Amino acid sequence: MVMLMKKFDTSKWGEFRLIDILKWETQKEINPRLILNSIDGEEQYAFIGQSSVNNGLISYVNIGKEMLNNIESKPLLLIHSNNHVVVYVDKPFYLKDGHGATSVLSSENLNEKNAMFLISVLNSSLDRVFDYDMKATKIMLKNHKIKLPVTESGKVDWEYMEEYIEKLEGKVTASLIVLDRAKHIPKKKADFSDWKDFGVVDFFDLSLPKGDIQVKGLDDGDIALITPSNTNNGLIQRIPRNSESTLYDAGCLTVDMFGNAYYHEEDFFVTAHGHVNVLIPKISISKGVGLFIATAIKSMFIQKYGFKDMCTQKVLKREMIKLPITSDGVPDWNYMEQYMERLQKKAEQLITCFG
């Protein structure tokens, strides 16, 4: 839902340090080995770790109440330092041992609705400052500033944020009714039996940037800067064209260390340290084909790679992707193009539904 929020005019919003609007709570962390001692037949509680998948939820367990966080079931936000994922919780939970890497935040004004608004603002703001090398530690977060809507007296307008999310939920509910009707339409099951495996390097040259672009302290500009991310095509901000790094042409793909893959319609830079691989086509490909291949790569790689097993350039050189083929056994570029055109039309219809 948060991703549906429109672009705001923030010129009249106020700027606040997180330490001034949120309180850092004490926390208890547990060794993940302890979940092997989970008590069956008792109420189970969320076991949360630093993951960008499923809001960090690892499992539900019960290893006793002495190590539970949030016994009072207060509305809380969790911010993980490594990936700066922001999570809302309002029930007791266990926290995976991360040496204090997760900030547990509260406010007497926080509730589920305005928390969703705040998470959207935080996601956008944190992505601009922090990355794998610049972690969102507690010290860094406390002085991190975000813009929020304000009352006439200049205080955070928690009520406005709550009302905005309520209106947004109304639009989503109306759209879900349309989607529910659509699910009864017969669907053709995808058949991949005639698809074939091809090496990534069969169609792309792999590149890493020359230069050392760091997210912190960059000037604003017109050229996209791409960083490891599972949202917004990896775009973290726009920087000047004369920035000291490799400028890549539109029409390339990127695959980051987590397996997120994107097609880029415009020129772009990528952040340093080899965390984003650039795939430069050896042949001319259309936007539709580029989007199809990026989607195929992400669907195959996203569950395969992570912090422990990164999708490096060395790994990518050996990777295979499955693509539709013609009767001659070569990639069916026309099928890919037409498939993405049909998908785009369906997406446009859904956007119209959300109105």
Image (tube, grey):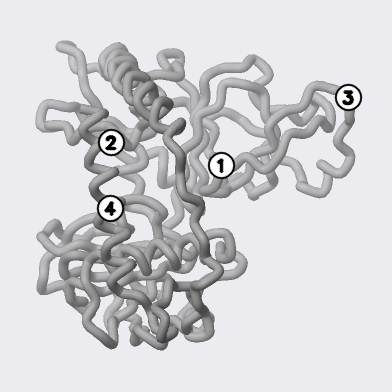
Question: Mark 2 sits on what residue?
Answer: 350
Dot 4 falls on a residue whose secondary structure is: helix
**Is residue 166 found left or right of 34 in the rendered image?**
left
Amino acid type of disc 3? Gly
Depth check, mark 1 against mark 4: the one in front is 4
Q: Are marks 2 and 3 in contact (CB under 8 Å)?
A: no
> Few, some or many C-alpha atoms within 10 Å of disc 2 (few <14, some 14-19, many ≥20)?
some
Q: Is residue 20 in sight in this rendering?
A: no
- Which residue is more in the foreground, 345 or 165? 345
Dot 1 falls on a residue whose secondary structure is: helix
Question: At x 33% / y 67%, what residue is drawn?
Answer: 336
Q: Determine the CA span between mark 2 and mark 3.
A: 43 Å
Question: Mark 4 sits on what residue?
Answer: 342
Question: Mark 1 sits on what residue?
Answer: 54
Depth check, mark 4 against mark 2: the one in front is 4
Q: Work out whether mark 3 precedes mark 1 in sequence or the reverse, and give the earlier one.
A: 3
Depth check, mark 2 against mark 3: the one in front is 2
Q: Determine the CA span between mark 1 and mark 4.
A: 29 Å
Amino acid type of disc 1? Asn
